[in-house]
Image: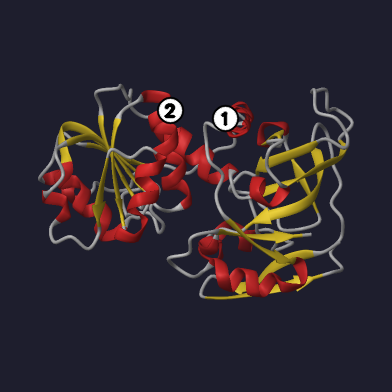
Amino acid sequence: MKAVQILGDASSPKITINSSMPKPTTIDSEILIHVHAAGITGDETTWPEVYQTPSRIPGHDISGTIDSFGPAYKGNLKIGQDVFAMIAADRGEGQAEYVVCTAEEIAPKPSSLSHAEAAVLPIPALTAWEAVEDFVKIRPDTRVLVTGASGAVGKQFVQLVKHLTQAHVTALASAQNHDVLRDLGADEVIDYASPHWESSIAPVSFVFDTVGGEVLSKTWETVEEGGTIITIGDPAPAWAFGNEEAPESLKYPSVKYKHFILSPNAKRLADVASMLDKGLLRPLDVRIFPFDQGVAAWDCAKQRGRDSKVVIEF
């Protein structure tokens, strides 16, 4: 089968394409997907998991059709059904003609979207949903700040937090993206380039940071006493895995903080599909590359400031 591979190591990764990879097989209750399109996460070359898989095939966001089931599968999905999936962070292997998934990773594809459009949504939408619902109780009177708001996760977060909670949303993004974010529901938009932007924001009780680094550090100044900061910044901050405290917590001891890595959730993914088909969520813009241009697709995906998500079609 055709597949993208990451050779080398994290210090010197090399993207290549391979047309003679073995087709995977299912066991137990696993599900084999014939992949039509796979999204690219540009910084996956820095993830240690991809170098620990024998195949070296990256990819966690996919859309395709069900090819077959393992002998123990007893769910409601059907062979030939269109689905999309977020493959768990420790497995991947989605950028190939076929990939093995679990039932918890899969949901029926939004019927209103193409495979290419569907393939870029699972990680951004599920990450945003987890941030909205799993850490604090967000209410209509909650003030929320999201950084990197014009990115794929940020755009989904703005829409979801407004739809699910009606909270007040301040979006941090470059000026050229402000009109789009207002259209998606942001109540306020702040420019990264504004001097001391962190001082201009009325205190918020919840920060969702998608950027990390200096931006994450500055958000501490925006949080009210007892508030919460959640980050998915990559690379993760030094405190992310519980080995040390955030240095900012010395100045802001009442602020709670956490880094998280997304987990698959078939129920939420199905809800995302329903919201997309009802027009309650907007899909992301995509740029499509055929498999034989897979290396160029990765080069494009690594570029900062893109307005679209990159997809490889198989």
The answer to the question of whether label 1 and label 2 lie on touching residues, with beta carbons closer than 8 A, is yes
Q: Give the percent coordinates (x, y) of residue 28.
A: 83, 33
- Residue at the spot x=80%, y=38% of the render? 31
Any part of residue 149 in sight = no
Looking at the picture, tell me which residue is in the foreground, 88 or 209. 209
Assign a secondary structure to mark 1.
Answer: helix
Q: Give the percent coordinates (x, y) of residue 276.
A: 59, 34
Q: Give the percent coordinates (x, y) of residue 26.
A: 85, 42
- Residue at the spot x=21%, y=48% of the render? 219
- Tag shown at residue 163: 2
Q: Give the percent coordinates (x, y) of residue 221.
A: 14, 46
The answer to whether 50 is drawn above or below residue 8 in the figure is above
Looking at the picture, tell me which residue is in the foreground, 140 or 8. 140
Which residue type carries mark 1? Met
The picture quadrant where one finds residue 225 is: top left
Model colouring: secondary structure
Any part of residue 150 in sight = yes
Within 10 angstroms of label 1, few (less than 14), some, or many (20 or more) residues? some
Instruction: State the CA–CA distance, disc 1 to disc 2.
Output: 10 Å
The residue pinned by badge 1 equals 275
Rendered-image quadrant of the N terminus: bottom right
